[in-house]
Image: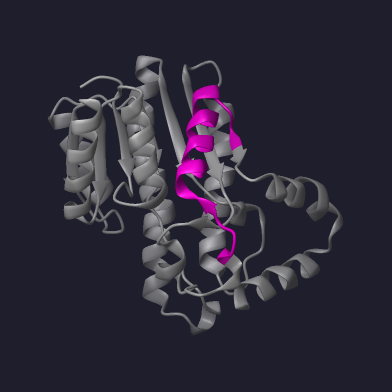
Amino acid sequence: MKNTALITGASSGIGKEFARIHASKGGDLILVARRKDLLDSLKEELVQKYNVAVQVIQKDLSVVGSSQELYDTVTQNGWQVDYLFNNAGFGGKGAFLDRDLEADVEMVRLNVMALLKLTHLFGKDMKARGNGKILQTASTAGFLPGPYQNTYFATKAFVVSHTQGLAHELKGSGVTVTALCPGPVATEFAKVAGFGGSKMFDGAASAAQTAQKGYRAMEQGKVICISEFQFTFLIKVLMPFLPQSMTAAIIAKMQQS
């Protein structure tokens, strides 16, 4: 396999679009997700259209030990991961104390712990070789307080902070790390998180456009990619002048709309 990208959460949404972009550039793929039927369908599409090598690994990365199992499978097969896309994740609507605790613990295991472990395992190999690219799917939520989606916002704040710190540590190593921070995107996320029919996702960006912006930022070695201008303006221009209580109130209203 050559120029190989490992993509978690590859069965749908942004992850699926990352796979299409990478294959269109002639890169091989390791596709990881829980739904093997969707991975197999994507593999068939990419092999036929781009004649690339595609491996499919069915794995629930929210399960304790699964990240190490994934790394072991990849290394035992002799596959070198040149691009790591930590894309798997989910959210959940509701006041924190009213939500099922185990659901939020599972969210932290997937959104934070799996990303942390895979970045460490594959990132260490990349650094030893002196080249590699890591793209973390974060969110504009990582810059904001998140009432009524508290744990999700907190997990994305971790991803943003971790990416910024790691990018500094990796300067001059030949390895780059980028956080893609979109606003609402038209994927399965809204339905899974309990936002079906919410006005919050009206006018959401397409997964394909968002993935293109993230992939381009990764290629350029950017650390943070806020994929929509209006959110760049909100986070970099307006937020510094707003009291945090006001920001939280605005987000709360958006979540409940």
Compared with residue 10, is residue 107 higher up or lower down, i.e. above or below? below
What is the quadrant of the C terminus in the image? bottom right
Instruction: Report the front residue among 67 and 5.
Output: 5
- The residue under the point 32% across, 45% down is 8
Q: Horizontal placement of 17 versus 209: left or right?
A: left
Relative to 187, does residue 55 appear above or below in the rendering?
above
| Residue 255 in sight here | yes
Q: Position of residue 35 (x, y in %)?
A: 21, 56
Within the magenta stretch, is there residue 184?
no
Q: Is residue 3 left or right of residue 85?
A: left
Which residue in the rendered view is the most extreme toward the front? 49
Is most of the magenta stretch helix, strand or loop?
Answer: helix
Quadrant of image for the N terminus: top left
The colouring scheme, among rainbow, by chain, secondary structure or one colour, is: one colour
Residue 241 located left or right of residue 101: right
Give coordinates of residue 182: x percent, y percent: 57, 49
**Foreground pick, 173 / 5:** 5
Q: Is residue 117 visible?
A: no
- The number of discs equals 0
**Residue pushed farthest bottom?**
98
Residue at screen point 35% across, 30% down: 22
Q: Quadrant of residue 27?
A: top left
Which residue is pictured at 56% across the width and 21% down the height?
171
The picture places residue 42, in percent across and down from the top left corner, at: 23, 44
The range drawn in magenta is 201-224
Residue at 54% in and 25% down: 221
Q: Tell me residue 93's x, y (percent).
A: 50, 74
Task: Judge from the rendering whether residue 144 lies leftward or rightward of residue 118; answer left or right.
Answer: right
Which residue is situated farthest in the left direction here?
Answer: 77
